[in-house]
Image: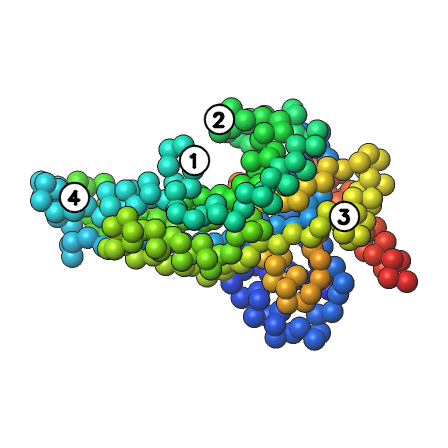
Amino acid sequence: MVVVEGEGMSGSPNMPDVLHRFRDELRASIALSTAGTRDAMGLPFCYAGSKGLLRVRLTVRGPEHPLDPGLAASVSNPVWRLLWALDHIKGEDEDIRVAGFYDNINGPAARRARTAARSPHQRRRTASSVGHPRFLFGMRGSSLLRSEVTLPTCNISAFSVEPTTNSTFIPTAASAQIDFQLVPEQNPVTIMELIRGHLVEKGFTDITVEELPGAYHPVRSPLDHPAFQRLVAVGERVHGTPLPALPLGTFAQPLHAISDILEMPVVTLALARHNSLIYGPNEHLPVDDLVRHSQSLSEYLIATAASAG
């Protein structure tokens, strides 16, 4: 069974309904996906799951029509209100400030951090490999890998002001789109409630907090699960050397829907490199990487069928 859907950039909002509708026809034993990146030596990571996703839009309404900027001394500006609200969600220190956001992740995250720390495969990775001047806090090596594996994220992906013009005025509205990648101990429904309550508690009752379609839970199979160990073994045969294995990566996929609705473990094999410009212009892959990835998937399917007798 091959699942192909084109709504990944918007959270795959219709995928759970489709899986429910055709549950009896969609019979399989393992969910195998492609996501993530390769390490600094060009070896693909094997992941035992995926982070979850929550997409939120904050909107602030201002005057009915644009106002003269001189009135900024006597009326509120929706852009400032939005900026102040965003500052209460994530601070300059990169800490997510929503009360209760981290409450459930300390213990399990520590176990994932120990797994990431044992991986030697990120030692030579540099910020320039992803087209950025530096990593946060000068992180590198195992500390960089631990942060990417164990930490949830809070990212602003869009910011808009109405009306759109270069004129000087007090705008009528401002909005921001935020996405959160969640780790296995976090629930997108709970996190959404925490965000709403947090903004109200901080006095932002004038802000509309909207959950965008496509929220889904994180999911992770045990690292010692036969399905995951088989992926690691197949990868070693194809590449001639052990592949790096991690619980999670820097991506979110709707694998929880497959795991939960169809009741099966999930495993993921990386394909892209850090400089492959995924989702960007000139997106590219080396042909040899694509060939070996295809070989790995084929051999994994054969090995899985053989293990089932």
Q: Which residue is mark 4?
A: 169
Q: Which numbered disc, 3 or 2, marks the residue that appears first in the sequence?
A: 2
**Label 2: few (<14), some (14–19) or many (≥20) C-alpha neighbours in 10 Å:** few
Tell me, for residue 137, which label it has, or none.
Answer: 2
Look at label 4 and name its amino acid. Answer: Phe
Q: Pointer 4 and pointer 2: residues touching (CB < 8 Å)?
A: no
Cβ–Cβ below 8 Å for labels 3 and 2?
no
**Residue at (19%, 41%) from the top-left corner?**
167
Q: Which mark is residue 222?
A: none
Q: Pointers 4 and 1 in contact (CB under 8 A)?
A: no
Label placed on residue 94: 1
Q: Please tell me whether mark 4 or mark 1 is closer to you in this view.
A: 1
User: What is the C-alpha distance between the residues marked 3 and 1?
Assistant: 33 Å
Looking at the image, which residue is at 49% across and 29% down? 136
Would you say 151 lies left or right of 261 here?
Answer: left
Separation (CA) of disc 3 from disc 2: 33 Å
Give the amino acid type for the residue marked by disc 3 in the picture. Asp
Q: CA distance from mark 1 to mark 2?
A: 10 Å
Where on the picture, by quarter, is residue 154?
Answer: top left
Q: CA distance from mark 4 to mark 3?
A: 60 Å
User: Which secondary structure lies at badge 3?
Assistant: loop
In front: label 3 or label 2:
3
Badge 1 crowding class, 10 Å Cα cut-off, few under 14, some 14 to 19, many 20 or more, is: few
